[in-house]
Image (spheres, rainbow, N blue to C red):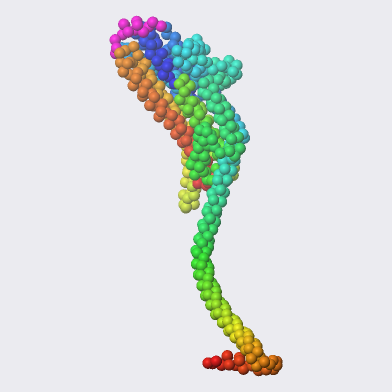
Amino acid sequence: MSILTLNNGLLLASDGSVNPLYVSADLALWTLIIFGGLLFLLGKFAWKPIIEGLNAREQCISDKIDAADKAEQQARTNLKQYEEKLAGAHDEAAAVMAEAKADANSAKEKIVAEANEEAIRTRQRALGDIETAKSEAVRELAESSVDTAVGLASSIVGRALSKDDHAKLIAESVERFSSPGA
Amino acid sequence: MNKDDEAVDAHAAPAEAAGGGLELPRGGEGHGVAGEHDGHDHGAGGHAAHGESLGMNDQLQANMDHYLDIGHLMAHVQDANFIETPGFLGLEYTDDQGHVHSGFGIPNVFGVEQPVVGTPEAPVLTLRPTKFMAIELVVAVLMFLVFCWLGRKIQSGQKPKGKVWNALEAMIVFIRDEVARPAIGKKDTDRFLPFILTTFFFVLGLNLFGMIPGFGSATGTMAVTGVLALFVFGVVVGSGVKKMGFVQFLKAQVPTMDLPPMLKMVLVPLIFVIEIFGMLVKHFVLAVRLFANMFAGHLVLAIFVAFIGVAGGTAIVYAVAPIAVLGSVAFSALELFVAFLQAYIFAFLASLFIGSAQHAH
């Protein structure tokens, strides 16, 4: 190995020859100190937080990806469930609609039937009332006619008819009125 | 690193040639020794005289002898105790031998005038700061500030924002996920990641500093890459011994062989020696690979720019200069890529060596 000299301000081998492989003891020692010191200082103050920070971030990203995978899986399951539910809801709605229609039809028929019955009942009741009124009217007419006839007869006969007579006459008159062809 | 200086030198070399008559500086003898290295103190006015006294071929020969001299080229890519600056900045540095350079000196902060080890004539350890030492210090301080800032940012749990933060994180995560983990294994990576990251960014920082004109790449010296490889070797052996125990670690260097006992007795020691030698060699090669790539790259870059100096003072300089500038720009782009590539390769191989030490052969 050549010896270092400061020839012309340049670090050359002492014999003046050019030796690219020349190893300067000064530079080697300086590099040892600088690199060793740098290794120690960076290891203590820089690489430790950097490596820990990167690992923490890596873990965080990994956890988030796992969580996202799980969430996606859950979302797929939920979607499937909702689709099944939706399909069920369609069927249910159709069933409800059919039932409602059936109910409506049955209610309609029932109402119509009740209305018809009510109409028949009303008609019959009206007919009954008419019949009663008619009978009443006939009876009143017969009484009135009897009274009138009795009055006339009394005035003609000149005597008063007794109560029993009246009743007898009324009954006869009514029977006459009531009998066909009377 | 040398464009401006070379441009200045383009005028200085002919002056040198003229000043010395036809005693042109010759490769190998002139530029490794004191007194003939720089091109800045040869005096002015030589250019005109030179043009008159020499033909174009002589001029080119003189320029080639000066600018393509290995000593001259080496001066631009190796360590020095001053940093070169372009001549137009007007900065001057006078070295110990009284030679004036365009640039500024690295202050002798330790105040040591005499060599600590060796003699003034043959010093071994001088403790004189050089530009590569200064660059290493600047890179280390920058790395410390930047990564402490990044550490605080990442630990805050905020989302990465901004180009610097994202770029640094991208590089760190790349080294961790694509370099360290495949080589060392996920379980052990975090233990060695600080070393691998420091190595990668330190090498990258030094490589990139080499792209700044006038500075030079500290990774283009064996002293730097050798120490870095020594660190890798220390980590490889240290982690292996810690994990397996010293004896087991040595045993693990020999692959398991199903051989007859007699043959085993002969082969195992032989293979052990080969494996230990192989381990030393691969770490040495780790140092040489980085050094050679960076050194050669910067030397080629210096040669590209030196062509301007070679053509200086002749008519062809107008054709050569643009080509040399374009060529050096293109080569600088390649060097920028190489700066990242070599840092990656160094970290990758360091990871591989560490990984292999964690498991038996």
In-front residue for pair B205/B50: B205
Residue A27 location (% of width, % of height) = 53, 24
Q: Quadrant of the C terminus of chain A?
A: bottom right
Residue B50 forms part of the magenta stretch: yes
Residue A87 location (% of width, % of height) = 50, 63
Q: In the picture, residue A140 is in which quadrant?
A: bottom right
Residue B84 location (% of width, % of height) = 47, 17
Residue B9 location (% of width, % of height) = 40, 13
- Main SS type for the magenta part? helix
Q: Which residues are magenta?
A: B44-57
Q: In the picture, residue B154 is in which quadrant?
A: top right
Q: Is residue A24 left or right of residue B24?
A: right
Residue A104 forms part of the magenta stretch: no
Is residue B121 something one can see in this rendering? no
In-front residue for pair A177/A95: A177
Q: Who's the residue at 37% across and 16% down the image?
A: B309
Judge whether A21 appears above or below B65 on screen: below
In-front residue for pair A166/A92: A166
Judge whether A31 appears above or below B247 on screen: above
